[in-house]
Amino acid sequence: DYSYYTDVREDEITGIAERFITETKRDNLPDAIIYRDTASLPFSDILAERFNNVVMESAGSFTFDATSVVQYSPDYVIFVLSEDSMDTAFGIK
C-alpha cells in the first residue's frame, strides 16, 4: 500500500502519482518519457532529476502515446514496472 506516500485513492490519483514534467535545464543530459506503476513512486522524483527534461506519466498509465513522443522528442521512452503491474501493462488476464 503506497497510499501513505502518494495519496493514491481508488477514485483519483494525486501527489507524485500524477503526471508531471520536469525541466532541469541541464542540456548535457538526455530527455525521457517515463511510464511507471505505483511501486516506482518513491523514486519517481529522483529518477526525474537524472534527465534534462522528463515527462512522468500518471502512475498506472501504460498506454504508449505517440503524440507525446512527437511533442517532446525524448531520447528515451522508459517503462518502470513491478511484478504486480505486468498484467495491466501487457494486457494479460
Image (spheres, rainbow, N blue to C red):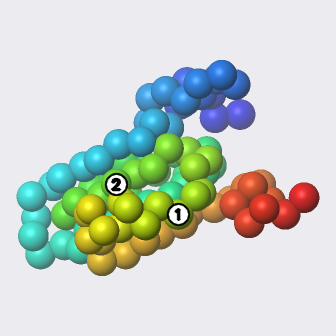
Which of 64 and 46 lies nearest the eye of the viewer?
Answer: 64
In this rendering, is residue 71 above or below 37?
Answer: below
In this rendering, is residue 53 above or below 19?
Answer: below
Q: Are marks 2 and 1 in contact (CB under 8 Å)?
A: no
Q: Residue furthest right?
A: 93
- Whether residue 25 is visible to the viewer of this picture, yes or no, is yes
33 sits to left or right of 6? left
Q: Nearer the viewer, mark 2 or mark 1?
A: 1
Tell which circle, 2 or 1, labels the residue nearer the N-terminal end.
Answer: 2
Residue 44 location (% of width, % of height): 43, 50
Quadrant (top left, top right, bottom left, bottom right) of the C terminus: bottom right
Amino acid type at mark 1:
Phe
Residue 70 location (% of width, % of height): 30, 68
Residue 49 location (% of width, % of height): 27, 56
Q: Answer few, some or many: residues within 10 Å of disc 2's Cα (few below 14, many 20 plus, some between 14 and 19).
A: many
Amino acid type at mark 2:
Val
- Whether residue 42 is visible to the viewer of this picture, yes or no, is no
In this rendering, is residue 22 above or below 89?
Answer: above
Dot label at residue 10: none
Which of 26 and 35 lies nearest the eye of the viewer?
Answer: 35
Give me the residue at 9% from left, 58% from top: 25
Residue 23 location (% of width, % of height): 18, 53
29 sits to left or right of 32? left
- Dot 1 lies on which element? loop
Q: Which residue is mark 1?
A: 64
Give me the residue at 78% from left, 62% from top: 91
Whole-angstrom CA distance, mark 2 to mark 1, is 12 Å
Residue 52, quarter of the rendered image: bottom left
10 sits to left or right of 12? right
Give me the residue at 47% from left, 61% from top: 65
Dot label at residue 55: 2
